[in-house]
Amino acid sequence: MLLNYAIGPECEGKTVKHVLKNKLGLSERLIKKLKYSGKVFCNSVPVHVIAQVKSGDVISVSIDFDEENDNVIPEEIDLDIIYEDDCLIAVNKQADMVVHPTCNHPTGTVANGLIWHLNRQGVNKKIRPVSRLDRDTTGIIIFAKNEYVQEHLVRQMKNKTFLKEYIGVVHGIVENTRGTIDLPIERKPGSIMLRHISESGYAAITHYEVISYLTSATFLRFFLETGRTHQIRVHCQAIGHPLFGDTLYSDFNDSVLIKRQALHSYKASFLHPVTKNTIELSAPIPQDITQLLEILRK
């Protein structure tokens, strides 16, 4: 895949590196990698990044690399792929599935299935998760197929132009129909997994809106301004309205109603790093949350 930039008068005399960084948005790290790869061209001729450009030149850069897949074992896994192109791939993740291999879960993850999926296409690529979901949180998870795309999507998240919407069902009646939870989060002392609210923690901001009121419960949508581990779960606990099924952050026993936290990554919207088109994705509300809603509406 080639990225192209036509040089205008404003770049006359600038270096190729200046164009790559300031016009095409490549990071120093990626420019350094490209510098020795022979993948940077001026008017279709390989060029060094310190070369100067002139008006009328066309700078092109190939952002595709065959990369080792970090020893992720390819596995045939039935994944619900909701979007794919040459740059990225989006999956509607099911419950009880880890996103990327760990010491405790070396196989059976979304990444294992995606490596198998790409290998079937004859593609040897390192896949790069742009965001992550907890094991039992369902919904949209996005992977970049190269470093350039990953960098641009992460940058959009930092700039708040990558929009994500979650839906969840919490205990109790949330009085305000919309609001913001602004409480810092850090790892709980003595625990590898648990997080808690702490003044010394990292800034964490969650916006919420009420979708509907249920029997001693509230159906909410969430918008994250930050992306801390377990953020929605910890914030819901902090305001006294823990998620149904959340065995880490709730004292309720909801196992008869739902076997996991009632949280789903529902929608995502972002600017495609290459085409610059707006991509809007959605993942249907899963059956277990739908059934929970039906029970709580009675």
Image: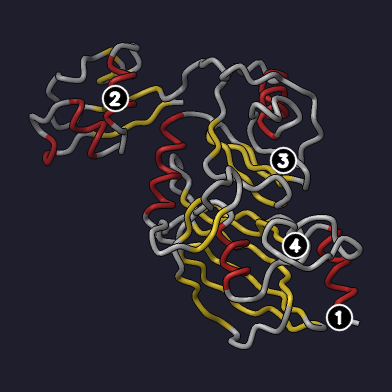
State which mark lies toward you, 4 or 3.
Answer: 4
The answer to which of marks 2 and 1 sits earlier in the sequence is 2
Q: Residue lying at the far left in this picture: please name it.
A: 13
Q: In the image, what residue type sits under mark 4?
A: Ala
CB within 8 Å, label 4 to label 2: no
Above/below status of 118 relative to 95: above
Q: Which residue is mark 1?
A: 297
Q: Which residue is mark 2?
A: 31
Instruction: Return the x and y of residue 142 as percentages of the image width and height.
Output: 59, 43
Kindly state the secondary structure of the residue where label 3 is placed. strand
Q: CA distance from mark 4 to mark 3?
A: 22 Å
Q: In the image, what residue type sits under mark 2?
A: Ile
Q: Is residue 96 left or right of residue 58?
A: right
* Point 55% across, 59% down: residue: 231
CB within 8 Å, label 2 to label 1: no
Q: Residues within 10 Å of mark 1 (few under 14, many from 20)?
A: few
* Point 78% across, 44% down: residue: 96
CB within 8 Å, label 2 to label 3: no
Q: Which residue is mark 4?
A: 262
Q: Residues within 10 Å of mark 4 (few under 14, many from 20)?
A: many
The answer to which of marks 4 and 2 sits earlier in the sequence is 2
